[in-house]
Image (tube, helix red, strand yellow):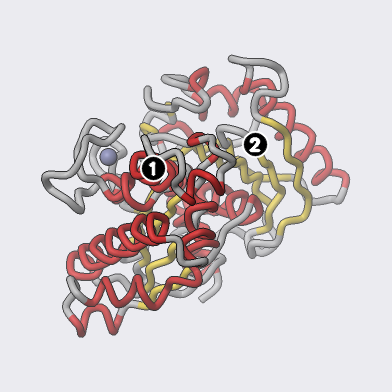
Amino acid sequence: MDVAARVARPVSAGTVLLGVDVGGTTTAVGAVTAEGEVLVDRLAPTHTAGPGRALETIVGLIESVGEAARRLGRPPHAVGVGVPGPVDTAAGRVGEHVPHVPELAGRPLAAELRARLGLPAFVDNDVNALALGEWMFGVGRGARSLVVLAPGTGFGAGIVLDGRLVRGVAGFGGELGHTPVKFDGPPCWCGGRGCLALYASGRGIAEAARARVAGHADAPLLRAAGGDPLAITAALVFERAAAGEPVAAAVVDEACRALGAVLGTVVNGLNPEVVVITGGVAASLAALEARILRAAGEYAFARALATTRVAIVPGDKRTSMRGAAALALYELGRGAAPERAG
Ligand SMILES: [Zn+2]
């Protein structure tokens, strides 16, 4: 089904949206068509202008990409922005928990961008935007329901059910990275304990590996990191596990089982048509798909798991820009007032 047929109030073919992915490190802006084609894109370090000045970089990139699109005769119709943290979408306001871009905390970003750019602007959590992007343009295209699990540094997730993004009453809908997989597990940085993120996010995997080698100067994993615990990254853990190093293999085994448990929760609880596993860690997980599905099989109803398609899709900045553009398209389609998109 094409996008124009799926949104409640169709936009015309070829409509251009500006998709903005605000990351802790890099911000990417793309001029994206309603069919998901990226016409122009620009990237810059989020803090190019210095600490506390991310908004200048974001606005500068948006203006530059918007101008380039206009020169192509394809003026943008709206702006969609994904930010790394919960968002009060009804107010278009970024929540208080955006540790990587703290200057955005509490800002009425949608209204500010609308005033500065003269375009409708919509803001949501980056993985909610990613879920809309996978649903409109990606492997979930044509599905009625889709769940995105996105292990990166942290662990984001997004849910589309029966054609609607599940935001929850306060913007926490879809925070599956912080569902417990061990009810008596260790404390998580979110304030909970035993969360999926502790076992299967980039930060969680690296910290779990560091904890296992602490006090063992001759541990092969530590030696592979040049003796510096902080040089143990999730990517290194996966690499050493594939080479048969037992400590790394144990950490990766826990990651697969934790992902399997949450896949079981998702499949039994929602039985979506598609689950997409993406994010920075997905590239390392692709080779482990069979193990993850086997682990999910220990928890999920067999028939439910068999009817849900699971795809591991390593993402990139273009995917994120398409997601943010999909957010704008979704809100325009719902006829949402720019600052009242709830
Ligand atoms: Zn947590």
Residue carrying label 1: 213
Instruction: Decide if residue 234 is in sight here.
Output: yes
Nearer to the camera, 81 or 226:
226
Alpha carbons under labels 2 and 1: distance apart: 35 Å
User: Mark 1 falls on what kind of element?
Assistant: helix
Q: Is residue 99 left or right of residue 116?
A: left
- Judge whether residue 336 can be spotted in this image: no
Label 2 secondary element = strand
Q: Looking at this view, is 200 or 273 the one in front?
A: 200
Nearer to me, 71 or 170: 170
Q: Is residue 108 above or below residue 36?
A: above
User: Mark on residue 167?
Assistant: none
- In primary-sequence order, the first of circles 2 and 1 is 2
Q: Which residue is mark 2?
A: 27
Q: What amino acid is labelled 2 in the image? A: Thr
Q: Residues within 10 Å of mark 2 (few under 14, many from 20)?
A: many
Q: Position of residue 147 (x, y in %)?
A: 36, 62
The quadrant holding residue 118 is: top right
